[in-house]
Image (cartoon, rainbow, N blue to C red):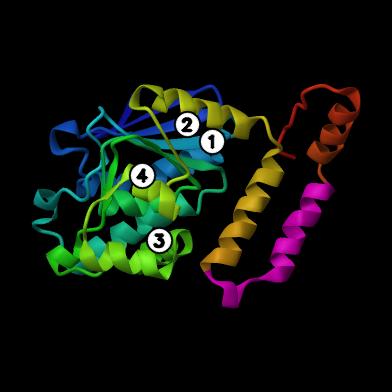
Amino acid sequence: MTPATPHIMTEKSGSTGWIVFNNPLRMNALTTDMWNALPGLMSEFDQDPEVRTIVLRGAGDKAFVSGADIGSLEHTSAEEAAHFYDAAFEGVAQARKPTIAMIQGYCIGGGMGLALGCDFRIAAQGAQFAIPAARLGLAYPLVATRRLIALVGPSNAKDILMTARRVNDEEALGMGLVNRTVAPGHLHEAVEALCLMLAENAPLTVTTEKQIVDAMTGAPSGFDNAACEKLITACYASEDYVEGRKAFAEKRKPHFKGR
């Protein structure tokens, strides 16, 4: 793996780009440098034609991300912190390619915001989730709150935000906060299998459906029907659609190129 910052590692393995939060002594809490670096790292993988999926994970088995490294924020104003939180959350959420949060251990505060911005959240059994803003006198960022509501509904969102309690993996699965849970020893295997499944599908279809679902759930009142119809039309006019039909007729695996 390549160190992108002292505490973030990146690696490209096959068609998957991996971003690893590497601050295990502090449960992978994110320093200001890590927050600021993340949007650029996401963009690099998003623009790499060889990458089909992007996975975010924490180093070790104790935490995905335990929140912000409070010590690194000592000389950061609230306005500056809000800016890089939003930039990091949006850097993850606005990626065109499928994104996966591979979660072990603690997924707390800002870690929840990053996971919420991913398309899939696969968690190891024993994972714990919380947004402790109410215990710190903070208000959770608006963009992350909107995504939380879209995933778990307003009642569960209020429970998580207003009580600041920890939610275990079983409850998280039941409320839709995570897509699935697996035994800790099988987490990496499960994530790689999902990456392969996504990579084998038509990239234009995958990115189109991602954008349409996000548009419908993110801001229904501002849903741009014409823009989404244009995305759908582009899929039908693509070389991949021709290849998909041909492969189906020939009973073979398609070879998609993303155009």
Answer with left or right where residue 258 lies relative to residue 199.
right
* Contact? badges 2 and 3 (CB < 8 Å): no
* Contact? badges 2 and 1 (CB < 8 Å): yes
Sequence-wise, the earlier of marks 4 and 2 is: 2
Stretch of the chain drawn in magenta = 219-237
Instruction: Judge whether residue 228 is colored magenta.
Output: yes
Which label sits on residue 148?
A: 3
Secondary-structure class at tag 2: strand
Q: CA distance from mark 2 to mark 3?
A: 25 Å
Q: CA distance from mark 2 to mark 1?
A: 6 Å
Q: CA distance from mark 4 to mark 1?
A: 26 Å
Residue at screen point 12% across, 52% down: 70
Sequence-wise, the earlier of marks 4 and 3 is: 3
Reading the image, the residue beneath label 2 is 17
Which label sits on residue 170?
A: 4
- Give the quarter of the figure containing the N terminus: top left
Q: Position of residue 16 (x, y in %)?
A: 51, 29
